[in-house]
Amino acid sequence: MAASDKTLGLLHEKLARVLDLMLEPQNVEYPYDTLKKDGDGNRIIETRVRVEYPSAAVLAVAAKVLKDNNITATIESDEKLSALRDKLQKRGRITDDDVKEAIKAAGNAMLQ
């Protein structure tokens, strides 16, 4: 039995929302042993925070969703991609084609 268009649409929407959340860097608390002891001789454990970024797997899934839905980006119409291109070109080693190829290889966007 095939899923209805409505069911597939809801699934697509949920996937997009989950991916959107997963693409944001997350502050993660973790215990840190200070190697110090308190007055009773107990080790002092502090809580620290580190930033975790999306995994390559999450980025690959997001890129595939974009590709499968024909969501594309062009350097000329995207301010952030254009700024990246300009920054890399100032280093004198990168061309527009290099930037396009790198973005495709990373799976971040399909360029037209």
Image (cartoon, rainbow, N blue to C red):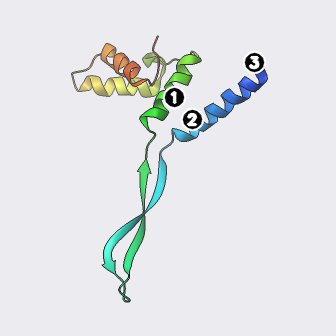
Kind of residue at badge 2:
Leu
Q: Is residue 3 left or right of residue 83?
A: right
Which is in the foreground here, disc 1 or disc 3?
3
* Secondary element at image label 3: loop
Q: Distance between the Cα atoms at labels 3 and 2?
A: 25 Å
User: Counting residues from the N terminus, which is met first, the one under dot 1 or under dot 3?
Assistant: 3
Say if 47 sits above or below 12 in the image: below
Tag shown at residue 2: 3
The answer to whether any part of residue 24 appears in the image is yes
Number of marks in picture: 3
Q: Residues within 10 Å of mark 1 (few under 14, many from 20)?
A: some
Marks 2/1: CA distance? 8 Å
Task: Name which residue lies at 49% across and 49% down.
Answer: 26
Residue 48 in which image quadrant: bottom left
Residue 51, given in percent of the width and then of the height, sits at 42, 51
Q: Which residue is mark 2?
A: 19
SS class, disc 2:
helix
